[in-house]
Structures are given as structure tokens and as C-alpha cells.
Amino acid sequence: MFAQFLDGMIQKVEGTLAAAVMGMDGISIEKRLADSGINVEALAAEYTTSLRTLLSTAKDAALGDLEELVVSTDRRTVAIRMITAEYFLLALLQKDANLGRARYELKRGRYLLAREFAV
């Protein structure tokens, strides 16, 4: 299920360099790379620290649960969608990729994949 979704994401969103299902421990459950030179685990590990902080801040400020994080730089965009409090989807995009479509696919993936994490 994970591999099928990630393959579809890379095919549907032109400019996707990497897509992964990650744990908050920074370890990938499944990943797909359009560029083999990308270390998605290292990237996710860096963002995991920020996610933990943002999850805590949102809770402390009574804002609700964190759903999405998008970070755009001059060269790349990282889009993250929480699946559960312990797992998230990550997409690394080229700067000119269709961010709206990527966000839609990540949101769709969250609902499709959440069933896999249900207890």
C-alpha cells in the first residue's frame, strides 16, 4: 500500500524528487526517490525535530493538532502531512513543482494510509 501510493505521487506530481512515509524517529517506513543522490532519511531526521516542536507548540497554544508543514527555499520545497502523531508523509519537490497538487496528494495519502496505522 505504501509503495503504491508513493509511486503514484511521484508520477502524478511532476517535479517530485522524493516521497516517503516516515516515523517520528526519522526512520523511513517506505520511500521512493526520483534522484538516487537524495538522502531522505537525513532530511526527515532534521524535520522531525521541528515537527516535534511544532506539535508541542500547537498543543500548548490550544491550536489543535498539526496537520501540515510546508517549507519553501530558493531551490526546493518540502511538504509534510501528518498521518498520525507518530508517522508522516514527506515530499521533496523541485522549486517549480506543482505545490498545490503535491499538497492534495499528501492529504489524500493521509486518509488512505491512516488505515494502515489504525490499531
Image: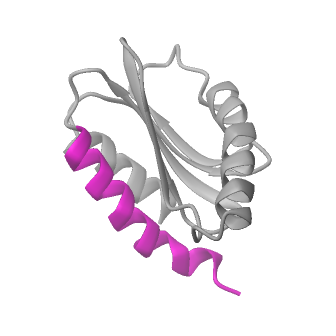
- What is the image's colouring? one colour
Q: Residue at x 80, y 47 (%)?
A: 25
Q: Quadrant of residue 28?
A: top right
**Residue stretch in magenta:** 99-119
**x, y (%) of residue 82?**
55, 60
**x, y (%) of residue 14?**
20, 33
Above or below, 45 relative to 111 = above
Choose between 80 and 55: the one closer to the eye: 55
Above or below, 39 relative to 108 = above
Label count reads 0
Dominant secondary structure, magenta: helix
Taking the view exactly as shown, the residue that stands out farthest to the front is 61
- Is residue 10 a member of the stretch shown in magenta? no
- Is residue 103 a member of the stretch shown in magenta? yes
Q: Residue at x 68, y 39 (%)?
A: 50
Choose between 79 and 7: the one closer to the eye: 79
**x, y (%) of residue 95?**
28, 20
**x, y (%) of residue 102?**
29, 46
Taking the view exactly as shown, the residue that stands out farthest to the right is 25
The reply, left or right, for residue 55 in relation to residue 99 is right
